[in-house]
Amino acid sequence: MNTKIFYSALTIVLIFSVFLLTFLIVISEKFPIGADVFYHLKLAEFYAHLDFRGAWNFMLSTDLVFYPPFYQLVIAPIALSGKPYLGLRILECLFMPLTVLTALW
């Protein structure tokens, strides 16, 4: 038996099942999963309105930690959209399985 083909097929089944499971988990909830999503969404709103002082004050009043604004700038268009929670749920459907794939790699 060729084990390489067996493990390749098993990996494909695992990847598909992770995407399916993540999709089912995300659509079963009304809001994005996790509490820090709301924190980063609020920071993204500050950045989207170019209110860097407000973002700085918000960061220091809640965590006393500076977060580099990369993630917040990525989700800034989602924060400005009419349905930011839907946009974040779509990102979760994509990036949660990619985290598992990265761990497998």
Image: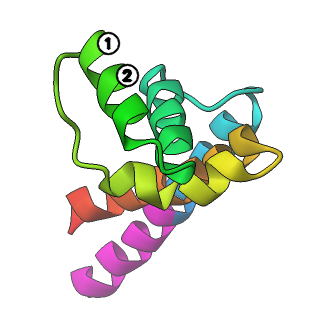
Kindly indicate the quadrant of the structure image that contains residue 85.
top right
Tell me the kind of residue under disc 2.
Phe
Asked if labels 1 and 2 touch by Cβ distance under 8 angstroms, the answer is: yes
Q: Residue furthest top?
A: 61
Determine if the magenta segment contains residue 13: yes
> Which residue is pictured at 53% across the width and 26% down the height?
38
Q: Which of the two residues, 64 or 84, is positioned nearer the viewer here?
A: 64
Q: Which mark is residue 58?
A: 2
Q: Residues within 10 Å of mark 1 (few under 14, many from 20)?
A: few
Tell me the kind of residue under disc 1.
Thr
> Which residue is pictured at 46% across the width and 64% down the height?
15
Q: Which mark is residue 22?
A: none
Q: Residues within 10 Å of mark 2 (few under 14, many from 20)?
A: some
Residue 90 visible (yes or no)? no
Which secondary structure class fits the magenta region best? helix
Q: Residue furthest right?
A: 82
Q: Secondary structure at mark 2?
A: helix
Q: Secondary structure at mark 1?
A: helix
Kindly indicate the quadrant of the structure image that contains residue 103.
bottom left
Q: Which residue is mark 1?
A: 62
Viewport quadrant of the N terminus: bottom left
Write down the region rendered in magenta.
1-15
Q: CA distance from mark 2 to mark 1?
A: 6 Å
> x, y (%) of residue 13?
50, 65
Residue 30 visible (yes or no)? yes
> x, y (%) of residue 25?
64, 35
> x, y (%) of residue 52?
37, 42
Q: Is residue 20 left or right of residue 63?
A: right
Determine if the magenta segment contains residue 97: no
Viewport quadrant of the C terminus: bottom left
Name above or below for residue 31 compared with residue 102.
above
